[in-house]
Image: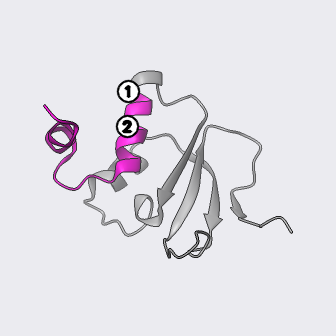
Amino acid sequence: LHTKAIITELHGRRPLLPEVWLQKIIELFGKDIPIVLFAPYGMRLNQSLSSKRWQKFTNGEYPKISSIIALPKDIYSNVLFHSEILIFNIPGLDPHYFYQPRI
């Protein structure tokens, strides 16, 4: 099978790739290791109560988020994209950071 067919079979027609990567990380290494994941806002937000992703975050299948780094949507040249960095299993961090460019 081609990669696209495998992903579709395991995760549905339009999987969110960062979620596929998170699931693979958990499958290979468990959910208790430090994880830093670049993701669109939709990974965490824009969910419904019946959403499978919402349920995985709230029922403990995915690890708790230790911290979030918010990125401005214009961080990339000529691209507007809502994204953030999700940090799991790294204690001692503030719950939320805003990206600050070095000047």
Q: In this view, does 12 lie to the left or right of 69?
A: left
Q: Is residue 41 left or right of residue 9?
A: right
How far across and how far down the image is residue 38, in percent?
Answer: 53, 52
Residue 48: percent from left, percent from top? 30, 66
Mark 1 residue type: Glu
Tell me if residue 51 can be seen.
yes
| Residues at discs 1 and 2 in contact (Cβ within 8 Å) | yes
Q: Where is residue 49 shown, x and y percent of the image?
A: 30, 63
Instruction: Kindly identify the amino acid type of the residue bearing the numbered disc 2.
Output: Gln
Residue farthest toward the front in the current orientation of the protein: 78
4 is within the stretch colored magenta:
yes
- Alpha-carbon distance for marks 1 and 2? 6 Å
For residue 88, the mark is none
Q: Residue shown at 17%/45% (left/top)?
A: 8
Q: Does the magenta stretch include residue 22?
A: yes
Provide the residue designation for mark 2.
23
Q: Residues within 10 Å of mark 2 (few under 14, many from 20)?
A: some
Report which quarter residue 25 is drawn in: top left
Q: Which class describes the residues within 10 Å of circle 1: few (<14), some (14-19), or many (20+)?
A: few
Give the camera-side residue of 72 and 87: 72
- Which quadrant, please, contains the C terminus? bottom right
Q: Is mark 1 on a helix, strand or loop?
A: helix
Q: Tell me the chief SS of the magenta region.
A: helix
Q: Which residue is drawn at 16% across and 53% down?
A: 13
Q: What element carries label 2?
A: helix
* Res 61 visible: no
On the image, numbered disc 1 is attached to which residue? Answer: 27
Q: What stretch is highlighted in magenta?
A: 1-26
